[in-house]
Amino acid sequence: MADKRKLLVIDDEPDIGAFVRDVALDVGYDAVAAHLPGSFEQVYSDDLDVIVLDLIMPGRDGVELLRIMAEQRANASIILISGYDTGVLHSAQKLASEQGLHVVGTLTKPIRYTELEEMLNTIAFPSRNKPFDAIEFLELPTEQELHLALNNGELEPFFQPQLRFSNNSLIGVEALIRWRHPDRGLLGPNIIIPLAEQSGLMDRLAAEVLQQSFKQAAEWLRAGLKTRVAINMAPCNFKDLDLPEWMDKKIRQYGLGPDQITLEVTETTLMQELIKSLDILTRLRMKQVKLSIDDFGTGYSSLVQLHRIPFSEIKIDKSFVMRATADKEALAIVKMTILLGHELGMKVVGEGIEDQATWDLLTSLGCDVAQGYFIAKPMPGWQLLEWAMKQNNSNLNH
């Protein structure tokens, strides 16, 4: 019989601590409750799987205990609870994440049995038979492998569809890099991008993604599918002031129109080469290439960048979209971003749509473009064409 998962609840209100403990016991945990935060060091241990922590407590509050857990390098999944507004919970959750802790969710008091039960049931745990020993890190590819991959054509963009909310038709795709590794299978950007940055290969990788995306768009056009391709820009793209001319030449070379290319730019990318970025992006817009500000709402000066740069599109960060149906603060940010985008004459893309409820919500708010797993996962170019044909999108044969 498998060992029970260990859960600790820290709450200065004994009744609430007992309630959380009892729900955990019902779910199948080995659970204990402590109502004196001052005794945290006596009840904490490295083998805890879940810690349920009240934020607002006399003497030592939950934020102080989070700091202690970060210092202890706690591996437990953490659930934060509070009787205060959700803004406090969100701030504490972000703080914990920045400290390297794993917060799986937040709950406001009074806590509902079913809500807590569902959260405890959905926490994913690593196998007990495979203790953490950095196995995943040992299997990461090397810089030399990435060099060979670029030479051997193992890197390619996959494409995730973007649909118009108004009629469900295909309006575009986002290019997302993938690596068909001969031994390790399909690898994503979370592995490719850091490896390219540390090995000085971002320039080559960025050029490869642009080139292959143009080529794929041209193949689709010949097959009867005209759609735009959104491509993420890296900081290295803004080192060369000749980029607009190079881009214009490539677009013409592949028989595309400039309106078929959208360049997605994050604020982090902009700030690394601000003057050159402003120069390059302004000239790209003059050449009719579309610009999208990506991950909107997560940067430090989003409104300043909207005023500075002639963006044609705002892409709401998925962290807000995915929580909008259950989180009033996230919902408010989504609403205001859509209103702001429309007031500035921009299209608004909602990224991270994973269910019907989120689709319906963004439809009701007047969002223009949808992207997410609810529509489709990223796929190779040939598969995207088949997918579009099956969808009977109005783009085909027009």
Image: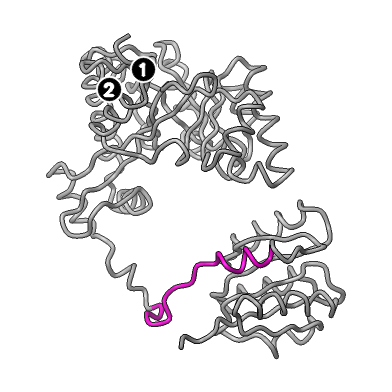
Residue under the point 40% across and 16% down: 289
Magenta segment: does it hold 47? no
Give the percent coordinates (x, y) of residue 253.
Answer: 21, 15
Instruction: Provide the secondary structure element on which disc 1 rests.
Output: helix
Residue under the point 47% across and 23% down: 168
Mark 2 or mark 1: whose residue is earlier in sequence: 2
In the displayed structure, does residue 15 sit left or right of residue 273? right
Question: Is residue 360 positioned above or below 26 on the image?
Answer: above
Q: Which segment is the magenta one?
A: 115-132
Reading the image, the residue beneath label 1 is: 260
Residue 308's disc is: none
Reading the image, the residue beneath label 2 is: 217
Give the percent coordinates (x, y) of residue 229.
Answer: 36, 25
Q: Residues within 10 Å of mark 1 (few under 14, many from 20)?
A: some
Quick one: 146 or 23, which is closer to the camera? 23
Q: What's under tag 2, amino acid-wise?
A: Ala
Q: What's under tag 1, amino acid-wise?
A: Gln
Question: Is residue 192 positioned above or below 126 on the image?
Answer: above
Give the percent coordinates (x, y) of residue 44.
Answer: 65, 85
Point out the residue furthest to the top here: 398
